[in-house]
Amino acid sequence: MASRMAMYDLMLNQTYGMEVMGVVLYLGNDPLRMNSEHSFFDFRYQCKMIDVRQLDPEVFLASDNAGEIIFAILTGEDGLKQKEVTIRKIFAKLQLLYADDRAMLLVKIKQLEMLSLLRGKFIQQKILEEERNMAVTIDIREDLRYQQGLGEGIEKGIERGIEIGAERILFATAEKMLINGMDISLVQSVTGLPKGKLEEIAKKLADSHPG
């Protein structure tokens, strides 16, 4: 990872003529073991590596951007009580942001569920419990736009959009995990993606970043 970051930083510096500081955000569950230094002869490079669990979830919860709010699930301590507090705050913020858009609220909750798998299925279960407590029904027929008569076609389109969005998150999550050096079998157990598809992603990453 350090050698890759050294290449990125140098290319950005040469392209834009600006000083660059590369930072790696580690999303995994295992202790951070990636080497942050790369050197040979007189060349020395070091990049900053941050385990996102060291970040304060309140920083992300204070945002009005749904993606940043959802990211809070990966930050902070892994203690169950702290995670439960974070989950409740995430739901509260999402409900405020999408008070008038039930369909988009459901999409963001599905994204939260997928991302939470990086912290284990137990955390995902807590999110599902909070979803039930929130009394959000998955029946899209209760969505305002459906009631206004836009019809079954929009219902199916929204449901398909949720499926596509969830699938994209899974592939993006798998790619990040592979970039961070996680074993394919572990990535498969977390994401549920076929091993063959993960091997294809790993090969493309290797081809685009040789060495």
Image: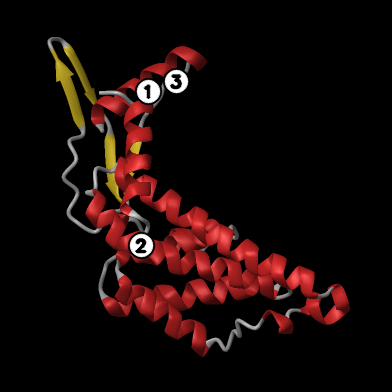
Q: What is the three-letter code of the residue carrying label 2? A: Gly
Image quarter of the N terminus: top left
Percent coordinates x, y for residue 96 in the rendering: 64, 73
Q: Residues within 10 Å of mark 1 (few under 14, many from 20)?
A: many
User: Is tag 1's residue or tag 2's residue first in the polypeptide sequence?
Assistant: 1
Residue at (45% x, 59% y) in the render: 71
112 left or right of 47 in image: right
In the image, residue 165 above or below residue 91:
above
Residue 54 in view in this figure: yes
The answer to which quarter of the image holds residue 121 is bottom left
Residue at (82% x, 82% y) in the render: 147
Q: Mark 3 or mark 2, which is nearer to you?
A: 2
Q: CA distance from mark 3 to mark 2?
A: 35 Å
Q: What is the three-letter code of the residue carrying label 1? A: Asp
Residue at (30% x, 23% y) in the render: 210
Where is mark 3, residue-wise? 12
Q: Which mark is drawn over residue 9?
A: 1
Disc 1 and disc 2 in contact, CB within 8 angstroms? no
Residue at (31% x, 43% y) in the render: 199
63 left or right of 104 in image: left
User: Is tag 3's residue or tag 2's residue first in the polypeptide sequence?
Assistant: 3
Q: CA distance from mark 3 to mark 1?
A: 5 Å
Disc 3 and disc 1 in contact, CB within 8 angstroms? yes
In the image, residue 22 above or below residue 12:
below
Q: Which mark is drawn over residue 190?
A: none
Q: CA distance from mark 1 to mark 2?
A: 34 Å
Where is mark 2, residue-wise? 192
